[in-house]
Amino acid sequence: MARTVLTALPGLLICVLLAWGAVLTADLPFVKANLHFSPLLIVILFGVALGSALKLPTWSDAGVSVAQKPLLRWAVAGLGFKLSILELLNIGGQALTVVVVCTFGALAFGWWLGVRTGLNEKLSILLSVGGSVCGASAVVAADTVVQAEGEDAAVSLGVVTLWGTVGIFVFPLLGRLLGAQPFGFGVWAGSSLQEMAQVVAGAEGFDEASVKVATVVKLARICLLAPIVFYLAWWLRRVRGAAGEAKVAPVPWFLVMFVVFAAVNTFAAQIGLTKEAMKLITDGVVLLLAVGMAGVGLKTTFRDLKKAGWKPVLVGFGQWVVLSCLALVLVEVMRI
């Protein structure tokens, strides 16, 4: 155990330094007044720039992987401390309708577009699942049954991370341009951006009130991952005669912890947690998110995308545009 911790420390330290630098940068007067960049956006840019410009030493791999996966998932679960269960009930059936229609619509379109443009079927499936549900974690979960070539999984991870990162920039700008309201913007971002951390960063770049809505909408979307993966396993066995075992939990553990933490926040006063204590906890969650996003950025380079060519990148972009436009239209039509 001690050896594992020591092995992870150097890479974790890099992520912590990037997160700290991002927090300081976001707090600069010029950035706050003109750019409105959140620490989460800045840290992933730092990570992508560093990971693409330099080949990270092997001694950093273990710590970066810890930041990218378990730490980031705990940070996402920790977002529950920002929510009240009573607030969850206010999201409503209309937002859930947007989630279901957009997720399955984007899944079908992305799969069709990938095959139509000449990508192999397994790569098309991974791209469509990752882009429509929850980014990298959806790609990994789907690959347990699709069993694609290693390069296909790497390309899919790169593509969904690339466009989700672009969305962190673009969504707040478009939201202000369109005169979006915080609630509607939260539903739009939660239904359209790929990774949970990207949803949080994009919503935070628009309005603090949007973060709560976007987080809940995104978690509702994540709940669709398990049935989609189980369907893929059934379909592949039936049509292709082979599939791996569906190694995805019926309910992601961090969703369970999110609800637990939301319950703690809801009844904080009753269990003796002061407002000051809750602020310390939520500040810690933001820092943990930044450290996790540093890991995501460091693991995202343009080398895999270049090797695969532009076709998967364009397919991922096409799916994302359709998903975003469909979500925006539904939000407007339903007057959410």
Image (cartoon, rainbow, N blue to C red):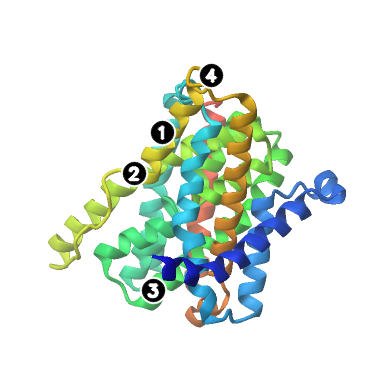
x 50%, y 77%: residue: 304
Q: Which mark is residue 224?
A: 2
Nearest-to-viewer mark from 4 and 3:
4
Instruction: Say which residue label 4 marks.
Output: 269
Neighbour tally class for label 1: few under 14, some 14-19, many 20 plus, Cα within 10 Å: many
| Cα distance between the residues tagged 2 and 1 | 17 Å
Q: In this rendering, is residue 223 above or below 59?
A: above
Q: Earlier in the sequence, mark 4 or mark 3?
A: 3
Q: Amino acid under label 2?
A: Leu
Q: Residue furthest top?
A: 270
Q: In this rendering, is residue 19 above or below 171?
A: below
Mark 2–mark 4 CB contact (< 8 Å)? no
Q: Earlier in the sequence, mark 4 or mark 1?
A: 1
Instruction: Say which residue label 3 marks.
Output: 152
Q: Amino acid under label 4?
A: Ala
- Secondary structure under the numbered disc 2 in the rendered image: loop
x and y percent of residue 247 in the render? 24, 57
| Cα distance between the residues tagged 4 and 3 | 49 Å
Instruction: Say which residue label 1 marks.
Output: 259
Nearer to us in this view, 281 or 245: 281
Q: Amino acid under label 1?
A: Val
Which image quarter: residue 12?
Answer: bottom right
x and y percent of residue 49 in the render? 67, 71
Q: Is residue 282 left or right of residue 315?
A: right
x 31%, y 69%: residue: 121
Nearest-to-viewer mark from 2 and 1:
1
Q: Amino acid under label 3?
A: Asp
Mark 4–mark 1 CB contact (< 8 Å)? no
Nearest-to-viewer mark from 4 and 1:
4
Neighbour tally class for label 2: few under 14, some 14-19, many 20 plus, Cα within 10 Å: some
Nearer to us in this view, 235 or 154: 154
Q: Earlier in the sequence, mark 2 or mark 3?
A: 3
